[in-house]
Image: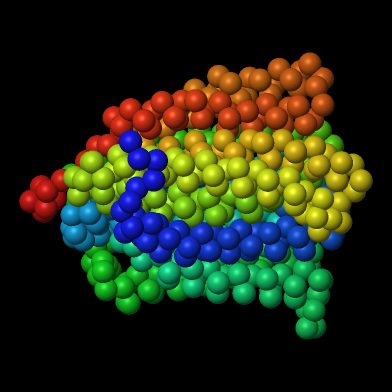
């Protein structure tokens, strides 16, 4: 048993995919961070309002990640067989599902912004700021859904750089407009959180427009056309539902978990909510490079399993586990060392800063487990074809471990950092399940059909 494969093409493909995907994730994070940091100068209510207002975006991202995951898992395996016709059919199904999800999310956010914010907090100042932000940013949801599916379709056939360039454009537009609209520069009035929402709206529209134009007019691998949207392959639709529902279901479970996190922490003061926002941004900053590697591993896994190269895949699996264990240790150290510097970027109250230090201490430990189990379970188990396992695993941990332990701790009057630690405990506990599942190698399943079946 080799812990590191000697196949140089694996490392080359991993790097060639992971770097642009990781950079794209970093830039996507930077767009949100720019909002968060600039709004941070407006005080705890503004920070908390945008944080709570973004919970709808968090839920939407989970749904879209499920749709993307279904596309990537199926399309990457078909890419291993070089069956681009089936990939176009899978992407067409994904676009239609994403459009429906985005439309519903937009209608809810625009119609009931204050009611949605009140689900998470009773702080009047937070509700006011959050509702203003959500009502405008809600219009971005449909654009976001379509753009992410377009980018996922390109990743599935190993075209990762275009997504990076599109994200660079989005970052430049968003940061520039944030500066102008939040603080009132170049003759514009100072709009505060409203300005941040308008900047996000414009940048998301451009992201959708450019990604769609590239896929429909420029891409030469898929050759996706408008006519592909007019037809739905019945067999592949059933496959998308069969294999996609557990992926989407897993994301729904995680959405419920994130919303419950916000609800539980929202019972505390604005300082605790602001600390959760600050900690979440640091966690996401460190997480992006792991996520890029995980996505790259997922494409390689799907392609390798789809081509029927199971012996190679076993060898790759050992290497992937060692890589992500090392990534986790480096990430934990980076979180701990950057704690005080990161907090100093915000104009937060002393209370929020104190809670932020405690929360960041927690994630400096739990992110080690996140990097191993989350990345390996997605990059290997889920992308290798055993989709339902991850869904079942997440469901058990969220509803039987994470939320009950946090609610009990809160009921007993435990300190906020103890409750926060309970909300993150599964990131370590899942590692024990992951190491057993991965090394049994019963997750390698070819999900593709022959071309004759999909015609």
Camera-side residue: 174 or 309?
309
Compared to residue 287, the image places residue 196 above or below, namely below
Whole-percent x, y for residue 13 in the image = 36, 60
Compared to residue 148, the image places residue 45 above or below, namely above
Residue 213 placement, left or right of 309: right
Please say which color scheme the image uses: rainbow
Residue 291 placement, left or right of 221: right
Whole-percent x, y for residue 57 in the image = 59, 50
Camera-side residue: 394 or 283?
283
Residue at the image point whose x is 32% and y is 77% from the top: 218
Camera-side residue: 49 or 79?
79
Q: Residue furthest bottom?
A: 186
Compared to residue 366, the image places residue 193 above or below, namely below
Q: How many marks?
A: 0
Residue at the image point whose x is 29% and y is 30% from the top: 442
Residue at the image point whose x is 49% and y is 55% from the top: 292
Q: Which residue lies furthest to the left in this view?
A: 452
The quarter of the rendered structure image containing the N terminus is top left
Residue at the image point whose x is 53% and y is 36% from the top: 254
- Answer yes or no: is residue 177 visible: yes
Camera-side residue: 235 or 442?
442
- Answer yes or no: is residue 119 visible: no
Whole-percent x, y for residue 59 in the image = 55, 44
Whole-percent x, y for residue 260 in the image = 64, 32
């Amino acid at each position: 048993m080799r812990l590191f494969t000697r196949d140089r093409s694996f490392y080359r493909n991993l790097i060639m995919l992971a770097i642009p995907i990781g950079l794209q994730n970093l830039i996507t994070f930077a767009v949100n961070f720019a909002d968060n940091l600039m709004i941070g100068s407006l005080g705890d209510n503004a920070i908390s309002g945008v944080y709570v207002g973004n919970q709808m975006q968090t839920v939407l991202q989970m749904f879209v990640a499920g749709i993307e995951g279904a596309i990537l898992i199926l399309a990457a395996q078909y890419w291993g067989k070089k069956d681009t016709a089936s990939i176009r059919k899978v992407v067409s199904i994904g676009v239609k599902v994403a459009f429906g999800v985005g439309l519903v999310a937009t209608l809810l956010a625009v119609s009931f912004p204050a009611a949605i914010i009140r689900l998470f907090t009773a702080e009047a100042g937070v509700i006011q700021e959050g509702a203003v932000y959500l009502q405008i940013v809600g219009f971005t949801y449909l654009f976001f859904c379509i753009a992410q599916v377009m980018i996922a379709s390109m990743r599935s056939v190993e075209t990762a750089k275009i997504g990076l360039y599109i994200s660079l454009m989005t970052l430049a537009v968003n940061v520039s407009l944030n500066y102008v609209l939040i603080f009132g520069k170049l003759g514009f009035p100072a709009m505060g959180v409203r300005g941040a929402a308008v900047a996000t709206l414009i940048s998301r529209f451009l992201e959708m427009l450019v990604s769609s134009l590239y896929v429909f007019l420029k891409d030469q691998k898929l050759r996706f056309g408008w006519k592909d949207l007019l037809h739905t392959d019945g067999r592949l639709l059933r496959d998308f539902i069969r294999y996609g529902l557990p992926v989407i279901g897993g994301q729904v479970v995680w959405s419920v978990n994130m919303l419950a996190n916000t609800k539980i922490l929202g019972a505390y003061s604005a300082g605790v909510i602001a600390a959760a926002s600050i900690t979440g941004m640091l966690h996401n900053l460190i997480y992006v490079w792991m996520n890029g590697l995980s996505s790259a591993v997922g494409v390689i896994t799907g392609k390798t399993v789809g081509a029927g190269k199971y012996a190679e895949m076993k060898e790759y699996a050992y290497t992937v586990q060692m890589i992500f264990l090392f990534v986790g240790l480096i990430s934990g150290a980076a979180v701990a060392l950057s704690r005080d510097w990161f907090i100093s970027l915000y104009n937060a109250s002393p209370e929020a800063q104190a809670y932020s230090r405690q929360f960041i201490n927690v994630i400096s430990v739990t992110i080690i487990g996140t990097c191993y189990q989350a990345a390996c379970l997605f990059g290997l188990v889920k992308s290798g074809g055993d989709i339902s396992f991850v869904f079942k695993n997440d469901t058990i941990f969220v509803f039987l471990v994470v939320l009950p332990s946090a609610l009990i701790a809160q009921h007993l009057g435990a300190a906020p950092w103890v409750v926060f630690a309970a909300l993150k405990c599964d990131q370590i506990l899942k590692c024990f399940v992951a190491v057993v599942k991965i090394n049994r190698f019963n997750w390698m399943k070819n999900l593709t059909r022959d071309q004759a079946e999909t015609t």
